[in-house]
Image: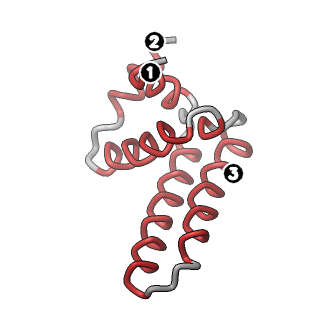
Amino acid sequence: MTYGEFWVHYLRAHQRTGTRALHYTGSVLALALVAAAAISGDWWLLPAAVVVGYGLAWIGHFAVEGNRPATFGHPVWSLVSDYRMLLLWLTGRLGPHLVRAAEER
């Protein structure tokens, strides 16, 4: 599987707004915890960033979307895609990607 193929699969696994909202929240909180760890030197915040980031995303998959997180099969591509999706959403450019992924079924 190429990353392009994974990206389409990833987006299909995030069709529901609630799933994406939990991902966005987890991703932003994880970044904030990493920044807080770097600024304060409290490195115990790093494991908290992982728990918060993945925890919220996995709640979205299991409770909202009803599917298996892509992290289990492709952890690096999944992490990259989490932040790619967040940045596309923040810049208002995610919609066309979601439409294209839905059309490629």
Answer left or right for 37 relative to 75: left
**Looking at the picture, how far across and down is residue 9, in whole percent?**
52, 24
Q: Residues within 10 Å of mark 2 (few under 14, many from 20)?
A: few
Near-viewer residue (72 or 56)? 72
Q: How many marks?
A: 3
Q: Earlier in the sequence, mark 1 or mark 3?
A: 3
Q: Residue at x 37, y 84 (%)?
A: 39
**Amino acid at circle 2:** Glu
Q: Quadrant of residue 16?
A: top right
Q: Earlier in the sequence, mark 2 or mark 3?
A: 3
**Looking at the picture, how far across and down is residue 56, in whole percent?**
62, 57
Q: Are marks 2 and 1 in contact (CB under 8 Å)?
A: yes
Near-viewer residue (2 or 103)? 2
Tell me if residue 53 comes above or below residue 11 in the rendering.
Answer: below
Q: Which residue is mark 2?
A: 104
SS class, disc 1? helix
Q: Residue at x 42, y 43 (%)?
A: 80
Q: Residue at x 66, y 38 (%)?
A: 72
Tell me if residue 33 comes above or below residue 95 in the rendering.
Answer: below
Q: Which residue is mark 1?
A: 101
SS class, disc 3? helix
**Amino acid at circle 1:** Ala
**Amino acid at circle 3:** Ile
Q: Which residue is mark 3?
A: 59
Q: CA distance from mark 1 to mark 3?
A: 22 Å
